[in-house]
Amino acid sequence: MEKRRIDVVIPVFNEIEIIELLHQRVDAACQSTGQSYRIIYVDDGSRDGTADWIAKHAIDANRSQADQSQNAGLESKGAVRLLSLSRNFGQPAAITAGLHASDADCVVLMDGDLQDPPELIPELLQKFESGAGVVIAQRSSRKETFVRGLCFAAFHRLFQILSESNVPKNTGTFCLMNRQAVDAICRLDESHRFFPALRSWVGFNVEIVRFERQERAGGEPKQTFTRLLRYALDAIFGNSLKPLRLLTASGVTLCALSIAAAAWFVGKRLIGFETAELGFTTILCSILGLGGFQLIATGVLGEYIGRIYEECRKRPPYLLASDLSSDSAAGTMIHPIQQSPSEHSTATDYSRRLSA
């Protein structure tokens, strides 16, 4: 197998209960590949000491191991990096920060709750070595509560119907991407980011690896219903014009029905048939129905207009509070601005240009 450099990007938020187990399993999985690797944790504004544990244990321990390897004349294959965001920006922003910081040959992206098994990393890498540009982990089943599982199933079904993105069913963020795919995603500077759709849009040779999604290793799900709903709206309205087209089709249909009904009543009157007068209830139902449709249409338009407003503000997707790395005395600050392919460089080179 050709020697590769692998970055494993893991966004974390208040995962103090499982962070030690997470690090142990990811580190062991990366070591089993025999490749040079770096684990990039992106702390999304945790308030329970998650970032402190990574800094004090994972990074310090890795530095000690690297020093021991260097003294023994051996090559140190692993490293740990911690990016701490200035506040909780949400998972899409944390993923973006991790991808901006990566400069490896390939990048593994996974959740930090251990529902994505790190032990799958060698299999993802195997597919990559076989020529795949993007290797997506597809859930064959998932262990969730009934209500939560039902909500996820409804969302994925609705997304498949309304979206114009060819996202494989039952897939999330867990994947491996080559350098080209990562660079392409980093060039996309939209504010509302649904990562599976972005990954699908950039294309490249895609392979699928199936796995059984596990239960959380500990703690409670950090994604609230409100945040999941916002994520779902971003996924649909940020990646498809079908809702607008459905509104247009509905409007045309209603107009055609109203014209047909008017012609029917006028025709009956002209040929002498009695026409029953429309009662108050009928008129009230018609007004409420049309009014409800207009409010829904206004809401859909508002979702698109709100996203246009967000894009026009040109705010960065995240702000970085600190950057620590085990392979240097002090981390190198990265800047949350995407670069074109010709301008793309590592975080270190970019920070040097900023300080020049």
Image (cartoon, grey):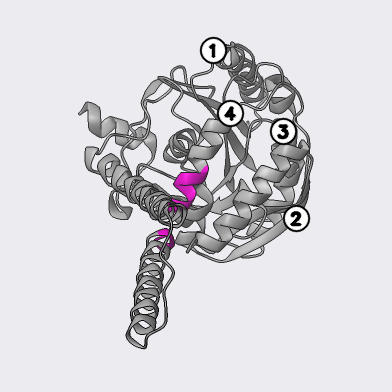
From the image, tell me which residue sits under label 3: 114
Give SS at disc 2.
Answer: strand
From the image, tell me which residue sits under label 1: 47
Q: Determine the residue positioned at 33% across, 32% down.
A: 335
Residue bounds of the magenta highlight = 232-243
Give me the C-alpha separation between circle 4 and circle 1: 16 Å
Give SS at disc 3.
Answer: loop
Queried whether the magenta region covers residue 238, the answer comes back as yes
Residue type at numbered disc 1: Arg
Q: Earlier in the sequence, mark 4 or mark 2?
A: 2
Front position in the image: 262 or 198: 262
Residue type at numbered disc 4: Thr
Is residue 220 found left or right of 83 in the rendered image?
right
Front position in the image: 246 or 237: 246
Q: Quadrant of residue 15?
A: top right
| Badge 1: residue crowd in 10 Å (few <14, some 14–19, many ≥20) | some
Is residue 263 found left or right of 158 in the rendered image?
left
Give me the C-alpha separation between circle 1 and circle 3: 20 Å
From the image, tell me which residue sits under label 2: 210
What label sits on residue 224 in the rendered view? Answer: 4
Q: Quadrant of residue 70?
A: top right
Q: Quadrant of residue 355?
A: top left
Is residue 238 visible in this depiction of the protein? no
Q: Determine the residue positioned at 52% across, 45% down.
A: 232
| Badge 2: residue crowd in 10 Å (few <14, some 14–19, many ≥20) | some
Residue 10, percent across and down? 58, 33
Total numbered circles: 4
Front position in the image: 63 or 232: 232
Q: Main secondary structure of the magenta part?
A: helix
Q: Earlier in the sequence, mark 4 or mark 3?
A: 3
